[in-house]
Amino acid sequence: MIRNSHADTSLEFPARIIHNIPVRLTEKEQRLYELVTGFVKKEYWRRRAGRISILNLITYQREICSSSFALLKALSSGKEYFPVFEEILALAKEIKINAKMKKVLEILKNLDGQTIIFTEYRATQIYIARFLEKQGYKVILFNGGLTNSGKEYIKYIFQKQKDILISTEAGSQGLNLQFCNNLINYDLPWNPMKIEQRIGRIHRLGQTSNVNIYNLFTLDTIEEKILKLLYDKINLFKSVMGGMEKILMDGERMHNLEKDILSILVEANNEDELEERFAELGNSLQGVRDYEKNLC
């Protein structure tokens, strides 16, 4: 089997219309973010000294930018315990609605046709679904564990009966949803290829309308820095994947990128240093992209 990327073909695809939507966290959400980030920074150095995995720290930092509900579920699992978790859990339980959810409602009210909402976390997915159902939207969920026939059934029901498909990363591959042209990235993966895979569900052969991509990002958080890294430096959202695809498909490279992002967040001594180091990381990704383009 030969797999061709968009760049290998002469086909004309509809435009990607990009909307980067800033979200200002509520006071409680901002406090929760600061508590989690403070814990991650402190624990990072202890784990580095002991050569202990930082995978959970990456997860906590990503979950807090997704929703308080994703973080709440993770910390309530009992797999890890630290005294500060008591304060974090208590605050997370006080938050009943996330600022991102209010922004999603604003977006949906101005959209025509069906919409896909992507999130990385099941807890966030369930929260979004319950909230939107209370607002009168017809919602269906897509996540891991479905059989092939189950996936096709969900796709069929979405196309025929529902307003919104809320999907985890399980839906970012293997689904062809060209009948839909609106996509909301509720949270932003730290892996650029995952974002491209999400968009590829609707921006593909057979799509006849321009594709609207709404990227939510929380201000004054790591999520805002990642958006600038992916959007401003490598211009990912406006381009159709081509030369960079071979590099981004490298799982080890992407795992290292996630660790690089966390280390920058933790090790930067101030905002200026944080911006500088993210700019350097962005420049390195831009260099990879330019190199690949020259090879094509």
Image (cartoon, rainbow, N blue to C red):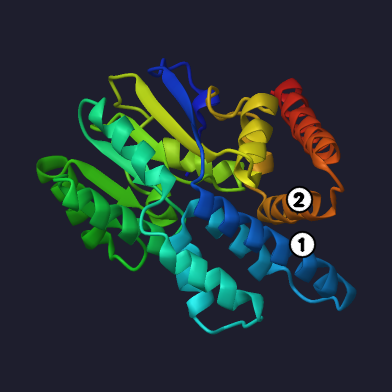
**Residue 33 at what x, y percent from top left?**
60, 55
Asked where in the image residue 248 lies, by quadrant, the reply is top right
User: Quick check: marks 1 and 2 in contact, CB under 8 Å?
Assistant: yes
Q: Can you tell which quarter of the image residue 15 is in?
A: top left
Relative placement, left or right, of 32 versus 15 is right
Q: Residue at x 45, y 25 (%)?
A: 19
Closer-to-camera residue (294/55): 55
Question: Quadrant of the rendered structure where residue 104 is?
Answer: top left
Is 200 left, or right, of 111 in this rendering?
Answer: right
Number of numbered markers: 2
Residue at image x 43%, y 20%?
17
**Which circle marks residue 194 in the picture?**
none
Is residue 2 visible to the viewer in this orientation of the structure?
A: no
Residue 22 higher or lower than 138, as above or below: above
Q: Is residue 25 above or below residue 10?
A: below
Query: Which residue lies at the image location 32% right of the left edge and 31% below the top edge?
Result: 107
**Disc on the earlier residue, 1 or 2:** 1
Secondary element under disc 2, as helix, strand or loop, is helix
Q: Is residue 81 left or right of residue 97?
A: right
Q: Which residue is mark 2?
A: 265
Q: Quadrant of the C terminus?
A: top right
**Which residue is tagged 1?**
41
Q: Amino acid at mark 1?
A: Lys
Task: Report the amino acid beneath label 2.
Answer: Leu
